[in-house]
Image (tube, rainbow, N blue to C red):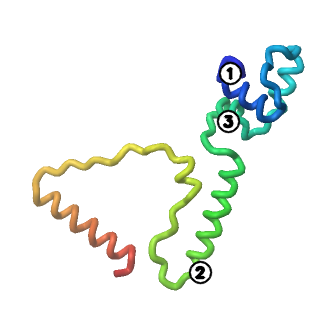
C-alpha cells in the first residue's frame, strides 16, 4: 500500500484512526490497521482501480432500475432513460467514423438515419 500511494494511506490513517505518523507504529499494527480500512478508503479504491465508491455504484444501480420501471409503465415511451451507473463507470468510447465515396452517398445515409430516428420515436 505504501508503494502504491503513500499519501492516500497517510490520509486514510489520519481520517480513520487519527494517526498522523504511521511509521511510528509497529509494522504488524500498521499492516492490521491498513487491512482494516473500509473498502471506500482512498488507498483501497486506488488499489482496486475504482473511481467511484461502492455505495454510490449501488445507489446508481437502484436509481437506474427505478427509472426503467417507471419508464416502462408510461404509455408513450419517449427515449429510454439514460443509465446513471453507466455514466459513472463508462470510459470514453472511441467515436465511429464513416467514409463516403460521394456526396450522394452521404445524403442517402443521412436520410436513412433520420428515418430510423423518426421510426424509433414514433413520429
Which x, y percent locates residue 76?
48, 83
Numbered label attached to residue 123: none
Quadrant placement of the N terminus: top right
Q: How far apart are marks 2 and 1 (CA)?
A: 50 Å
Q: Distance between the residues labelled 2 and 3?
A: 38 Å
Which x, y percent locates residue 48?
67, 33
Which x, y percent locates residue 21?
79, 19
Numbered label attached to residue 6: 1
Of badges 2 and 1, nearer the viewer stands 1
Instruction: Check whether the beta carbons of the residues at disc 2 and disc 1 lie within 8 A of each other.
Output: no
- Residue 61 in the image: above or below residue 75: above
- Residue 111 in the image: above or below residue 49: below
Answer few, some or many: residues within 10 Å of disc 3's Cα (few below 14, many 20 plus, some between 14 and 19).
Answer: some
Q: Mark 2 points at which residue?
A: 73
User: Residue 16 is drawn in which quadrant?
Assistant: top right
Which x, y percent locates residue 41?
73, 36
Answer few, some or many: residues within 10 Å of disc 2's Cα (few below 14, many 20 plus, some between 14 and 19).
Answer: few
The residue that appears at 56% across and 58% down in the rendered structure is 84
Instruction: Check whether the beta carbons of the residues at disc 2 and disc 3 lie within 8 A of each other.
Output: no
Please tell me which of labels 2 and 1 falls first in the chain: 1
User: Residue 68 is drawn in which quadrant?
Assistant: bottom right
Q: Is residue 53 left or right of residue 97?
A: right
Q: Name the residue under label 3.
A: 45
Of badges 3 and 1, nearer the viewer stands 1
User: Residue 6 is drawn in which quadrant?
Assistant: top right
Please tell me which of labels 3 and 1 falls first in the chain: 1
The residue that appears at 86% across and 16% down in the rendered structure is 25
The residue that appears at 66% across and 24% down in the rendered structure is 7
In the depicted view, which residue is nearer to us: 16 or 84?
16
Quadrant placement of the C terminus: bottom left
Is label 3 in a helix, a strand or a loop?
Answer: helix
Is label 1 in a helix, a strand or a loop?
Answer: helix
Amino acid at each position: 500500500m505504501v508503494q502504491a500511494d503513500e499519501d492516500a494511506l497517510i490520509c486514510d490513517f489520519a481520517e480513520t484512526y487519527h494517526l498522523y505518523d504511521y511509521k511510528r507504529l509497529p509494522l504488524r499494527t500498521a499492516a492490521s490497521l491498513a487491512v482494516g480500512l473500509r473498502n471506500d478508503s482512498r488507498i483501497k479504491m486506488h488499489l482496486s482501480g475504482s473511481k467511484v465508491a461502492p455505495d454510490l455504484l449501488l445507489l446508481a444501480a437502484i436509481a437506474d432500475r427505478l427509472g426503467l420501471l417507471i419508464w416502462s409503465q408510461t404509455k408513450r415511451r419517449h427515449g429510454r432513460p439514460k443509465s446513471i451507473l453507466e455514466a459513472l463507470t463508462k470510459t470514453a468510447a472511441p467515436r465511429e467514423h464513416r467514409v463516403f465515396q460521394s456526396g450522394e452517398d452521404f445524403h442517402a445515409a443521412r436520410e436513412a438515419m433520420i428515418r430510423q430516428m423518426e421510426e424509433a420515436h414514433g413520429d
